[in-house]
Amino acid sequence: MSSVSSASARTLFRHHPFLFYFAARGLSKFCFQVGAVAVGWQVYALTNSAADLGLVGLVQFIPTAILVFAAGHVADRYDRRRVAQFSQLAAALAAAFLAWGSFAGWIAVPEIFAAVAVFGAAIAFESPAAAAILPGVVPEGMLQRAAALSTGAFQIASIGGPALGGLIYALGPGVPYALMAALWFAAALLSGAIKLDRPIAAKKQSVLSDLFAGVGFVRRNPAILGSISLDLFAVLLGGATALLPIYARDILHTGPWGLGVLRGAPAVGALLMAAVLTRCPINRRVGMRMFQAVIVFGVATVVFAFSHSIWLSILALAVVGAADMVSMVIRIALVQLRTPDEMRGRVGAVNYLFVNASYQLGEFESGIAAWLLGAVPAAALGGIGTIVVALLWMKLFPSLRNVERLE
């Protein structure tokens, strides 16, 4: 089985459409992770406020919430590669703006928030378009492995991005932003070079109801609704990443490099799990495995919350990342396999709003909770809430719990 899986992975990497997709998405994710460290540390250095750290997530979420349904419609009506490409170019310009302001010394929190809002708008358009591209760049029968590999690329970026962002921030706040601008531009070039194996003709007509067709589709499919909403509440409640600058400086007593290591720890665990899932896909009791992974996610978050040792904190965050990877791969494959291609952009938009955007909203929730209760109680209550949601969802969505295989 291992040799067969290794051969499958090699086949995917030799397939140029998937390779370009893999590289473009990996670079884009890398830029977001570098930005998360640079923006978080810069805002906290300027304000010393947990509430302002939470506002970073809210500012990124608002344009996402406003634009995401239009973005899904655009992804189904226009060339998805161009949608992703233009989104990456917009993000590159916003990063260049932050680099300019930081090097010149006039950047302040309002300007940072304005650029973060552009990042939110860019990812709102990029995410559903890129998710809908994936089945078109993968050979038949290899979607679960491709999902694990592409998600693994994101985790590689999530390891290198925070670590490098924390290190080069010491050279000056503008340095990580300049790097982000250059790499986002490279990602845009790669997105434009993708050639789809199974291109989809653009829709010729549009009506307003099409914007929200993805919502109706998700509501009519309980397994998809359950998987998306489960990740929504797990990330919303268990998203302690907004508190990492507080943990790094005030609890674990380290600096920007320590923040980078902490930001990268979940990605290390996720990458290791991605390697396991690429070689050994989950072939039975898929729904139950998703619930188990979310419970482990919550338990590890509680351990992190009470840790005063940087090594235990790193280990707990790595477990968080590994558990999240299992849940993510199952959700991605389940949604893609049960969605017709002409709906993938709009369903991807719903998926993004419920799950990926909940990272930003979860950062806002964590920041406000830490402002009111303190960082440790806020992180611990979030982990406990995640466990409770997983147990409740097992009862509310038996169709998800009973999913046996991804076919």
Image (cartoon, rainbow, N blue to C red):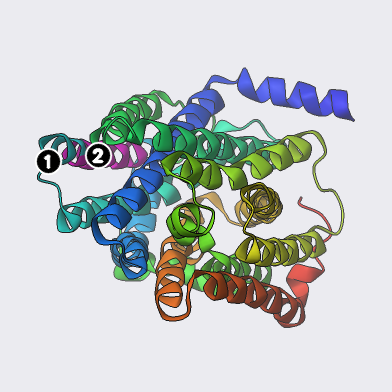
Based on the picture, tell me whether residue 208 belongs to the magenta stretch: no
The spot of residue 232 in percent (x, y) is: 55, 68
Q: Amino acid at mark 1?
A: Gly
In 3D space, how far apart are the residues under numbered discs 1 and 2 (Cα atoms)? 15 Å
Q: Magenta segment, which residues?
A: 82-98
Outermost front residue: 253
In the current view of this chain or complex, which residue is farthest to the top? 14
Relative height, residue 44 to residue 222 (above, below): above
Q: Earlier in the sequence, mark 1 or mark 2?
A: 2
- The quarter holding residue 234 reads bottom right
Q: Quadrant of the N terminus?
A: top right
- Give the camera-side residue of 234 and 396: 234
Callout 2: SS: helix
Q: Nearer the viewer, residue 30 or 8?
A: 30
Residue under label 1? 105
Q: Position of residue 222 (x, y in %)?
A: 66, 73
Left or right of 280? Residue 372 is left
**Image point (22%, 50%), residue name:** 115
